[in-house]
Image (tube, helix red, strand yellow):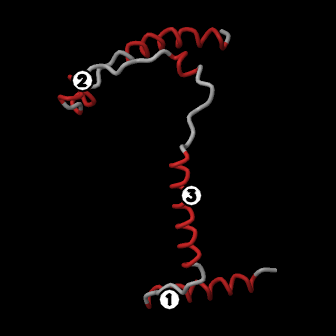
């Protein structure tokens, strides 16, 4: 029997099973809904053509852009202030760092 012919009975059994499984109820999801969600009206639907026909996607407003640039400048100045600064370390952290530096030196010495 050809391979393609063997797949046909399997697919003919699998398709109805998948269709029936698609109709399954999910009580766990229904139980999560609050009363307000159950009683809420369906949202207003708009035609797809209205979305597709928009000439350009809406961009950031001048106000939002100015605010983001100000935040970026503040973060950059904060980062500049922190770079090069010595960070306080606990004794345990300092010991581990020293051990790692020693191990790195050993590994560099082993390189050909």
| Horizontal and vertical percent position of residue 99 | 56, 87
Give how far apart the Cα atoms at labels 3 and 2 are. 40 Å
Q: In what quadrant of the picture does the C terminus appear?
A: bottom right
Which quarter of the figure has residue 108? Answer: bottom right
| Label 2 crowd bin: few (<14), some (14–19), many (20+), radius 10 Å | few
38 or 107, nearer to the observer: 38
Q: Horizontally, is 42 left or right of 75 in the view?
A: left
- Residue shown at 47% from the left, 87% from the top: 88
Callout 1: SS: helix
Label 2 vs 1, first from the N-terminus:
2
90 or 16, nearer to the observer: 90
Q: Which residue is mark 1?
A: 94
8 or 76, nearer to the observer: 76
- Residue shown at 55% from the left, 47% from the top: 62
Up the image or down, 43 lies above or below 82; here it is above
- Residue shown at 66% from the left, 14% from the top: 3
Q: Are marks 3 and 1 in contact (CB under 8 Å)?
A: no
| Horizontal and vertical percent position of residue 87 | 50, 84
């Amino acid at each position: 029997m050809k391979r393609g012919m063997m797949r046909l009975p399997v697919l003919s059994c699998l398709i109805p099973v998948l269709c029936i499984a698609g109709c399954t109820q999910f009580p766990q999801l229904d139980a999560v809904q609050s009363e307000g969600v159950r009683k809420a009206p369906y949202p207003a639907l708009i035609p797809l053509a209205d979305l597709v026909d928009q000439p350009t996607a809406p961009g950031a407003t001048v106000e939002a852009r100015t605010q983001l640039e100000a935040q970026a400048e503040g973060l950059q100045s904060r980062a500049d202030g922190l770079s090069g600064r010595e960070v306080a370390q606990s004794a345990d952290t300092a010991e581990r760092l020293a051990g790692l530096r020693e191990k790195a030196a050993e590994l560099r010495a082993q390189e050909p």
